[in-house]
Every structure is written in structure tokens, then in C-alpha cells.
Image (tube, helix red, strand yellow):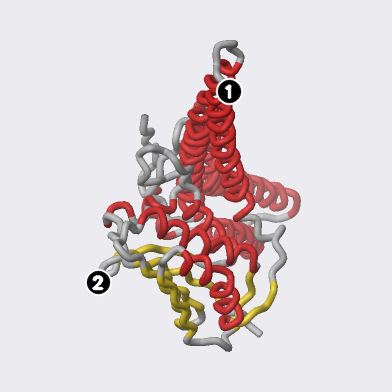
């Protein structure tokens, strides 16, 4: 349930125009100025009183009267000063301390009751802090949902072949199977075990792909990287009857990257094209060029593309267009993790002439 903040009149205007540092500075300056004003005022007033009563009163009577006047003035000035600073303290409490207390309560409610905090229209430091906390909660919840989907999908991908392994294993315990049937069941168990291993290996690769600190980075040129990628995949791709061209328009530009991660990134893009392009004669191309301070790799196929509303979803962990769940759908998510680990980005777009194009942008090395 959304809670409305209680505010005293003009607090909204003050929140929009006064920062807490400004309020604290005003209070300090006001306090010092007030003390100086009081000292000057008392000294001048004492001088006036003494002049006024010097001619009218003499001796002890004069001193008693002046002392009483001083006491009354000091008492009145003290009461007035206390009222002033109590008012300032109340204003400071309502402007700064109370909102921080409400923010602390919102954090506690989220921690204890999972109640999502609300954004505020305050534009001071407290308002920005509360909105940042609300945004952070949204990011955390999105990640938690993604993790739950990840665990559920991994569980599904493992449970299905594992159920088959258990079923075939139980049949092998019967005494009425022919040797041919036993060999068939052993082959099926082995096939299902390989599928489970593939899921686990890909999940492990997904976890490792975003760990930049654990991966050694090296300075390389765009030409060297494109040459390595062509030597790594050209023969294998062409042997499968697929066209593959690599063009580097800026061979001397430099970047800092991990070769194994780059090999994995573009290998996953090639594997994705093999499984999902659905082209009659598949053609793949990789183009490298410089755009500003970025080194951009354009990987394109001539397949059927992706529906526009799914161009962002394809990078989510375990998203796959394979309705039979034969693949775990982590390949493109791994690509995004690798690109982010290198300080870059990866996006996908449909090409007007047909096919899907991935755009991998990596920062140039500053040497």
C-alpha cells in the first residue's frame, strides 16, 4: 500500500529549493550573526541606559535599577533566542531528519516485509536517495526473478534427460532384455548423460563469462583479432557448406580483450546462426570498423531474423525459440556478459534485406 508523506506547509517548496547543506550553512551563519547582534545590542543598550539614569539616579539606587533592567533584557532576549532556534530546529527536523527516518523505515519494511519503497517527488538529497533506493530495489527484484527463471529452466533441462536415464536404468535391471536391447538402452543413457553435461557446461560457462578480473586481458589490434577469428572458424563453417567472410576496415586500431572470451563470444554467435537462422543457403559475415571511440563488430546472417518484440529477450538467460527445450538458451546471454565484462555492449537488429545482425561495440584502447 502506498503511504503518503505528511508535510507541514511550504515544506514542498523548501525541499525543492533548499538543499540540506544550504540549510545547515544558513543555521550556522544565523547563529553566529545572532550572537554578534545580541552582543552589540546589549552593549549599545547598556550605554544608553547608563546615560539615561546617570542624571536621574545616583549611587546604589542607580546600580540596582540598571542591574534589574539588564536581567529583564537578558531574560527576554534569551526567551526570544530560544524561540527562534526551536523554530529553526523544528524546520530542520521536518526538512532533513524526518525524511531520513521515513527512508530508514522504508528500508526496514523492505528488508522485513518485502514491501517495495515508493518514489518521491522531492528533489533534494533525501529525495534523490529515496528514488535511488527505489530504483535499486527494482533492479534487485528483476535480478531475483531472472535467477529464479534461470534455476527453473536449468532444473527443467536437467530433469527431462535425467528422468529418461532413470527409466532406462531400471529397464536394464530386468532379466528379459536381449543383448541388442541392452546395448540400445546403454546408448540412450549415454546420449542423455551427454545432454546433461552440455547443460551443466554451458551454465558453468555462463557463470564464468562475466568474471573479467579472473580473465587475463591483453592488448591486441583489430586486424590480429579478426585474423584469429577467421583462422578459428572459417574452415569449420565452410566445411558445413556455409559461406563465411571476415572484413576488417581498421586493422591497426587497438583494444584490450581476452582472446578466449572473444573466441567464445563469436563462436556463440556462429552457433546461434546455425541453429536459428533457418536460411536455405546460410551466409555469415563479420565486419570490423571504428565508430568514434568504439570498435564495432557487425556479425550478420541471411536468415529469417527475429520478431522485433523479441530482439531484447534473446539476450535473457535461457531464452530460446526452441519449443522442445533441446538447448539451454545461454549462448547469447553469455555473449552479453562477455561484452559487458570488456566494457562494451551487444545489440541485435533485423536487416532490411533479410537476416539478423549483431552489433558488438568494444572500447578502443587508450595508448
Where residue 48 appears, x then y in whole percent? 61, 63
- Give the label, 2 or 1, closer to the camera: 1
Q: Which mark is residue 54?
A: none
- Mark 2 nearby-residue class (10 Å; few <14, some 14–19, many ≥20): few
Residue at point 28%, 60% (across, down) = 304
Residue at point 41%, 58% (across, down) = 274
Q: Nearer the viewer, residue 335 or 197?
A: 197
Where residue 119 appears, x then y in whole percent? 40, 45
Residue 230 lies, with reference to residue 308, above or below; the image says: below
Q: Are marks 2 and 1 in contact (CB under 8 Å)?
A: no
Q: Nearer the viewer, residue 152 or 292?
A: 152
Query: Is disc 1 placed on a helix, strand or loop?
Result: helix
According to the picture, the residue beneath numbered tag 1 turns out to be 179
Name the residue furthest right.
60
According to the picture, the residue beneath numbered tag 2 turns out to be 353
| Residue 70 visible in image | yes
Residue 322 lies, with reference to residue 339, above or below; the image says: above
Which quadrant of the rendered structure holds the N terminus? top left
The quarter of the picture where residue 298 lies is bottom left
Where residue 168 appears, x then y in whole percent? 54, 22
Name the residue furthest front.
179
Q: Nearer the viewer, residue 196 or 307?
A: 196
Amino acid at each position: 500500500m502506498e503511504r503518503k508523506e505528511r508535510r507541514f506547509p511550504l515544506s514542498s517548496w523548501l525541499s525543492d529549493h533548499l538543499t540540506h547543506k544550504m540549510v545547515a550553512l544558513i543555521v550556522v551563519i544565523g547563529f553566529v550573526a545572532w550572537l554578534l547582534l545580541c552582543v552589540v545590542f546589549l552593549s549599545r543598550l547598556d550605554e544608553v541606559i547608563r546615560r539615561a539614569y546617570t542624571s536621574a539616579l545616583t549611587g546604589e539606587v542607580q546600580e540596582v535599577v540598571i542591574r534589574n533592567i539588564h536581567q529583564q533584557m537578558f531574560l527576554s532576549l534569551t526567551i526570544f533566542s530560544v524561540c527562534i532556534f526551536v523554530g529553526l530546529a523544528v524546520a530542520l527536523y521536518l526538512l532533513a531528519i524526518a525524511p531520513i527516518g521515513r527512508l530508514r523505515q522504508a528500508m526496514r519494511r523492505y528488508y522485513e516485509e518485502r514491501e517495495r519503497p515508493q518514489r518521491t517527488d522531492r528533489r533534494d538529497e533525501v529525495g534523490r536517495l529515496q528514488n535511488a533506493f527505489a530504483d535499486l530495489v527494482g533492479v534487485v527484484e528483476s535480478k531475483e526473478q531472472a535467477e529464479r527463471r534461470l534455476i527453473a529452466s536449468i532444473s527443467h533441462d536437467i530433469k527431462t534427460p535425467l528422468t529418461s536415464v532413470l527409466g532406462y536404468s531400471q529397464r536394464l535391471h530386468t532379466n528379459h532384455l536381449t543383448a541388442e536391447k541392452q546395448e540400445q538402452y546403454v546408448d540412450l543413457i549415454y546420449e542423455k548423460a551427454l545432454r546433461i553435461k552440455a547443460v551443466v557446461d554451458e551454465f558453468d560457462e555462463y557463470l564464468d563469462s562475466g568474471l573479467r578480473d579472473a580473465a587475463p586481458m591483453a592488448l591486441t589490434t583489430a586486424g590480429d583479432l579478426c585474423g584469429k577469428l577467421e583462422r578459428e572458424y572459417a574452415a569449420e563453417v565452410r566445411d558445413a557448406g556455409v559461406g563465411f567472410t571476415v572484413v576488417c576496415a581498421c586493422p591497426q586500431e587497438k583494444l584490450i580483450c581476452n582472446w578466449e572470451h572473444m573466441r567464445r563470444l563469436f563462436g556463440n554467435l556462429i552457433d546461434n546462426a546455425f541453429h536459428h537462422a533457418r536460411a536455405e543457403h546460410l551466409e555469415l559475415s563479420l565486419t570490423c570498423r571504428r565508430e568514434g571511440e568504439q570498435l564495432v563488430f557487425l556479425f550478420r546472417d541471411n536468415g529469417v531474423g527475429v520478431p522485433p518484440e523479441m530482439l531484447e529477450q534473446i539476450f535473457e538467460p535461457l531464452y530460446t525459440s526452441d519449443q522442445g527445450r533441446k538447448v539451454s538458451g545461454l549462448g547469447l546471454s553469455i555473449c552479453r556478459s562477455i561484452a559487458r565484462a570488456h566494457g562494451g555492449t551487444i545489440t541485435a537488429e533485423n536487416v532490411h534485406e533479410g537476416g539478423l545482425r549483431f552489433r558488438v561495440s568494444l572500447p578502443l584502447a587508450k595508448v
